[in-house]
Structure formats: C-alpha cells, structure tokens
Image: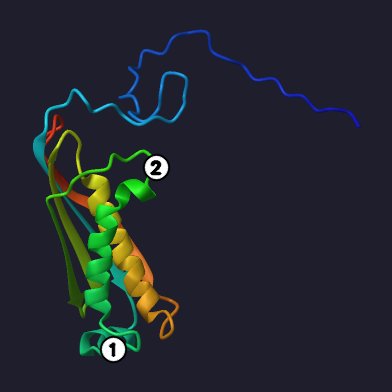
Amino acid sequence: MARKTSTTKTSTTKSSKKAGPALSHIGASGEARMVDVSDKPATERLAVAEGRVVMTRTTFDLIVSGNAKKGDVLGTARIAGIMAAKRTSELIPLCHPLALSKVIVDIEPDPKLPGCVIRASVKVTGPTGVEMEALTAVSVACLTIYDMIKAVERGVRIEGIHLVEKLGGKSGHYRA
C-alpha cells in the first residue's frame, strides 16, 4: 500500500505579534511542572466561585421539603464542598497543598431555575491563590447534589461553574 504524504508551507517571516503570557505550569521543554512559589510573599488571598444545579420542579420541591431518600441533600453537599476544598491538591495534580483558613459553601435553593446556586468562598494567607480550591468546592458540591437526587431525576444539569472573584497576590483583584 502506498504511503500518502503531505506537504505544508511554513512561513519564514517573523510574526509582529507579541507572545501572550507563558503558562506557568509548562516548563521550557513543554513538560508539566509545579510552580515554585518559595520566593513569593505570604499574603491574604480570597477566591469566590459559583455554579448551578438545575432540575425539574418536582425534584426541587423534594430537596427543599427535606424528603429526599438519601437525607439532607443541601447539608451533605455543603460538607462535601468544604472537604473538597481542603483536598484540592490531591485532585488537581499541580496544585500546591494549602493550609486554608476559611471555607464557606453556601447553597441557595432557587425556584426560578428550578435548582440550587452553589457559592464557595475560600481564604488563605500564603504564597499562592485559592481559585482552584473554590472551584473544586463548587464542583464537588454540585456533584454531590446530583448523586443524592439521581435516583429521582437523571436529567439534572450542572452549569456555569466559574470564578466570581479573586483578591490578593501579584495579579490583584479580579471580578467576573
């Protein structure tokens, strides 16, 4: 069988565009690496993330009334989110283990969705931020809600997980 080859033209002119910021977890040879934060000052850092779990009105009413077969859906999801924030470095390969000083996971039932809005606030004093911890807390809280109601409704949707706000560190204040 004949081997098919293709030729591609490469441009020899240099681009006038500046390269964007380098990815901090990629080394010079393209290898994944953990960022060295040993020279960074310990500052107070805060991150807030949010997400939604959308379901049918019937399932929503079951959660709000406290009649789900597996028990307290929102309380269990809140604890799961807090635990997840504390274990983020075990789940995300290049995250630094951090001594978190505060983790709050709020879950608000929203009849307009219908569903729940999950918001996590995570705080630390250290050399690196806590965005991943806040995002992980929200993600696991959402997954826990799904797990606890999947027997009633398989079509539940987890949506819109995102960073809402970040304070501290060299890059300063970010707000979505």
Circle 2 Cα neighbour tier, 10 Å, few/some/many (<14 / 14–19 / ≥20): few
Instruction: Tell me: residue 65, above or below residue 46.
Output: below
Instruction: Tell me: residue 152, above or below residue 161.
Output: below
Amino acid type of the residue tagged 2 in the rendering: Pro
Q: Which of marks 2 and 1 is in front?
A: 2
Q: What element carries label 2?
A: loop
Residue 22 placement (x, y as % from top left) = 34, 24
In the rendered structure, find residue 62 and report the number of the disc placed on it: 1
In the image, farthest residue toward the right: 1
Residue 51 placement (x, y as % from top left) = 26, 62
Left or right of 142 in this view: 11: right
Residue 161 placement (x, y as % from top left) = 29, 57
Left or right of 39 in this view: 156: right
The residue at 21%/80% (across/down) is 111
Q: Mark 2 points at which residue?
A: 93
Instruction: Tell me: residue 28, above or below residue 119.
Output: above
Circle 1 Cα neighbour tier, 10 Å, few/some/many (<14 / 14–19 / ≥20): some
Q: In the rendered image, which quarter is residue 65 located in?
A: bottom left
